Image: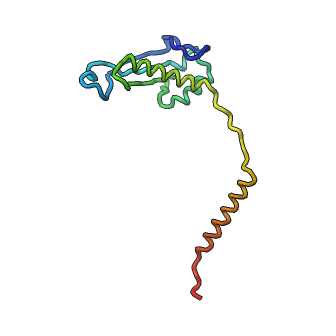
Amino acid sequence: MLYITDTITLQDWELTESFMRASGPGGQNVNKVSSAVELRFEAASSPSLPLPVKNRLRRLAGRRWTSEGALVLQCDETRSQARNRDIIRERLKELIEKAITPPKRRIATRPTLGSKKRRLKAKKVRGEVKAMRGKVDPD
């Protein structure tokens, strides 16, 4: 069981872990031990997550969201399988916590009168500079 918040806890049947040999440093050990972890969370069929959280999670996950509605995360940062498991579970927890908080609504603002005047003055000065670039009369 993975505890996220007071209201959200993921059950063991929702999470599937598979292990594979990792690339990178590790010497001979890297060819023998399956230390990389792939965590698959069946988010679309999860009763733990409300629908708005699932939608935000899908947007945050990007390519990691499969067409079946599963979230697939991978980790092969360390040489230890147990440490990689902890890292990947923590990443899943952080991703779900980020999806729980709804995005802030943007408050429309208007430019101040001073900023409008400064912009128009800068445009006028720039136009005058460009107007002076014309051909010079040979008189």
Q: Position of residue 106 (x, y in %)?
A: 68, 37
Residue 3 or residue 42, whichever sits in front: 3
Residue at x-position 47% and y-position 15%: 15
When asked about the image quadrant of residue 139, the answer is bottom right
When asked about the image quadrant of residue 101, the answer is top right
When asked about the image quadrant of residue 132, the answer is bottom right
Above-or-below relation of 21 to 121: above
Question: In the displayed image of the protein, which residue is found farthest to the bottom?
Answer: 139
Question: In the displayed image of the protein, which residue is found farthest to the right?
Answer: 113
Above-or-below relation of 6 to 131: above
Residue at x-position 59% and y-position 76%: 134
Q: Position of residue 49 (x, y in %)?
A: 59, 18
Residue at x-position 50% and y-position 22%: 92
Q: Is residue 73 left or right of residue 106?
A: left
Q: How many marks?
A: 0
Q: Is residue 18 left or right of residue 116?
A: left
Q: Position of residue 69 (x, y in %)?
A: 51, 23
Q: Is residue 108 left or right of residue 37?
A: right
Q: Position of residue 72 (x, y in %)?
A: 46, 23
What colour-coding does the image apply? Answer: rainbow
